[in-house]
Image (cartoon, grey):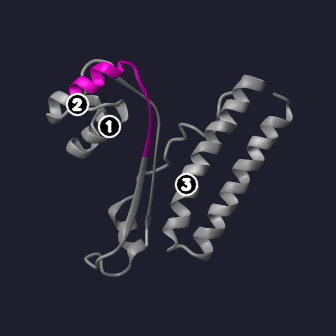
Amino acid sequence: MSQASIKYAAAALCAAITEHAALCEDDPENAPMIAPLTGKIHELVRKYGTALRDISGWSNPLLGIPKETPVSDSDLVEEIGDDPTERCWVSVVDQHALFVNDPDALVNHAEERIGEKFETVVEALLALLSADGWKPEAYPGQVIESDWRSTDACIG
């Protein structure tokens, strides 16, 4: 890898953020276009961090940024309008990247929990998600280890 690869990763990330910003500003109700860009930005943040670590030894400054203050209910009411009881459309995208430390144990847990046979780890994870919501901390032992998580939401 050359020194230019950090700059290339940064430029690609900036371009994706600029594209996301333009769509959110110009066509904020276009969820089918905006949501995939969120995933692309997350991927490019990770690639930027990998380039930084591999070339310079520095860690990614864009990961693990604490929130300044949590969003209050009053902020949400202002965002959706005067009538907080009015029906509104909300999109929530919650992404997880995981290490499955013991694929067989995870599949066995899913089969016992769901009562079906699963061919792959992905099938087992999706079945557990469907049955339980998302509760990897409830899985036995150290079967799953979280690598990263990101959540994005918008009201349209």
Give the labeled residue for mark 2: 110
Quarter that holds the C terminus = bottom left
Gap in angstroms between the C-alphas marked 2 and 1: 9 Å
The spot of residue 115 in percent (x, y) is: 14, 34
Determine whether, in the image, residue 63 is placed left or right of residue 122: right
Q: Quadrant of residue 96?
A: top left
Give the labeled residue for mark 3: 38
Q: Magenta segment, which residues?
A: 95-109
Q: Look at label 1 and name its amino acid.
A: Glu
Q: Residues within 10 Å of mark 3 (few under 14, many from 20)?
A: some
Whether pointer 2 and pointer 1 mark residues with C-beta atoms closer than 8 Å, the reply is yes
Q: Residues within 10 Å of mark 2 (few under 14, many from 20)?
A: many
The spot of residue 59 in percent (x, y) is: 66, 28
Which is more toward the observer, 84 or 123? 123
**Which numbered mark, 2 or 1, is in the foreground of this view?**
1
Dot 1 or dot 3, earlier in sequence: 3
Helix, strand or loop at disc 1?
helix
* Residue 123, label in figure: 1
